[in-house]
Image (cartoon, helix red, strand yellow):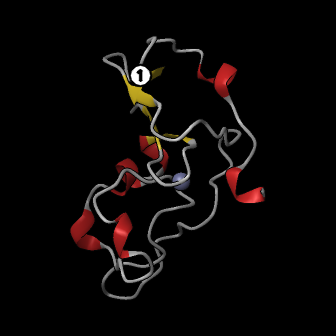
Amino acid sequence: MSLFQCEVCGCCENTALSFQGCSFVEVYDWSYAPERQGKRLCSVCGPLKYRDGTSTGLGQWHGEFRRVFLPLGMFVTNQRGNLAHKDTGDENYRAYAIEDPSHG
Ligand SMILES: [Zn+2]
């Protein structure tokens, strides 16, 4: 398991808590947001339903740790499975935390 940055909202997410970032694209119903298919998604941005119509349980934060928003596209998963700034390699991602972008 490792950390990654959601490609829609920019928050820091754990692969184990988001079905590997919703990377198994063929099992989901993407009609809610087709542009998200193929991106690494957090548990909030992920698909609400599977193709057969059953609920994925996604669409809300899992609550296992605090949701930290980061500047979109600025963080990558490094070889240790930690989130690191793509330019500096800094793993202290919390130092770059920003306000929830959806709240203005
Ligand atoms: Zn997200």
Say which of 74 and 41 sits in front.
74
Image height of 5 relative to 8, above or below = above
Q: Residue at x 46, y 29 (%)?
A: 75
- The residue at 48%/79% (across/down) is 55
Q: Nearer the viewer, residue 68 or 86?
A: 86
Label total for image: 1
Indicate yes or no: mark 1 CB to ligand 1 under 8 Å: no
For disc 1, the marked residue is 86
Vertical placement of residue 73 versus 52, above or below? above
Taking depth in this image into account, of 22 and 72 the one nearest to the observer is 72
Q: Amino acid at mark 1?
A: Lys
Q: Position of residue 3 (x, y in %)?
A: 46, 32
The residue carrying pointer 1 sits among few (fewer than 14), some (14 to 19) or many (20 or more) residues within 10 Å by Cα, namely some
Q: Is residue 44 left or right of residue 20?
A: right
Q: Quadrant of residue 103?
A: bottom right
- How far from the left and from the top, in percent, is residue 104? 78, 57
Residue at screen point 38% across, 27% down: 77
